[in-house]
Image (cartoon, helix red, strand yellow):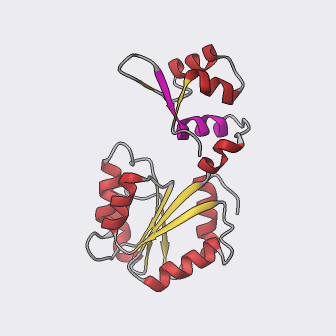
Amino acid sequence: MPKKIYSTTEAARICHVERATIIRWIDVGILKAFKTPTGRNKILTEDLVDLLKENKMPIPAVLRELARKLIYVVDDEEDFLYIIKERLIGEKGEAPFDLETFDNGFEALMSIGKKRPDILITDVRMPEMNGYELCKKLKENGDTKMMKIIIISGYLDQELDRFKKNGLADAYLEKPIDFKELRRLITAYADIEF
C-alpha cells in the first residue's frame, strides 16, 4: 500500500525530477502541498497523482490504484441501486472506477467525510436527508464544493429550477436513466474511458 503523505525528496524520486523542481512546483502552485509545524513541505498522495495525470506523466504502479476514481450513487430505491451498479460496473466488476451505493443522503454525507468521491450521483426525494440538502451541504463546504454532482430524479421537471438557481449540480438526468448519457458524463467528469 502506498504512503499517504510524501516528502519533497520522495515526490522528486517518483516524478523523476530534482527536489528543487518539486519545491518550485509547490511555490508556484503547480503541486499542492502543506507545511508541517517545522516548515517542511508534505504532499498528499492524491495531489501527487493529480500532478502526474495533469502533466501526462507516467503513474508508478505503486500509485496506480490510488488513481482509480470513486463514484457514489445515492438513491432510496434498492432496485435502482442494483441496476445502476449492474449497468456501470457489470457482473465482473471491471470498470475503471470504484462505485459505492447509499440509500440516503445522510449515510452518503457521513462517508464523504471519510472518503471523498470524484463524482456523486444522487436522487432528490429520499428519507432522512434528501438530495437537495445533501448537495447544498457539499457545495457550502470548501473541501467538497468542486465535487461533480449528477442529479437523477423521476420528478426532474419539478426539481430542476431549485437546483439550477442555487448552482448545486453539474448535470441532471431524468429517470428512467439514459445510461449512454450517464456514461458520457462519467467519462467527461472523471477523465476516464469505459
Foreground of the two, 52 or 174 = 52
Query: Which quadrant of the view contains residue 20?
Result: top right
The residue sitting at 31% across, 57% down in the picture is 136
Residue 190 in the image: state x and y as whole percent. Answer: 59, 54
The residue sitting at 64% across, 23% down in the picture is 12
Q: Which residues are magenta?
A: 41-54
The relative height of residue 150 versus residue 156 in the rendered view (above or below) is above
Furthest residue in direction top, as rendered: 20
Query: Which quadrant of the view contains residue 126?
Result: bottom left
Foreground of the two, 40 or 113 = 40
Is 166 one of the magenta-colored residues?
Answer: no
The relative height of residue 131 versus residue 30 in the rendered view (above or below) is below
Does residue 25 appear in this view?
no
The residue sitting at 37% across, 57% down in the picture is 168
Foreground of the two, 138 or 107 = 107
Furthest residue in direction bottom, as rendered: 79
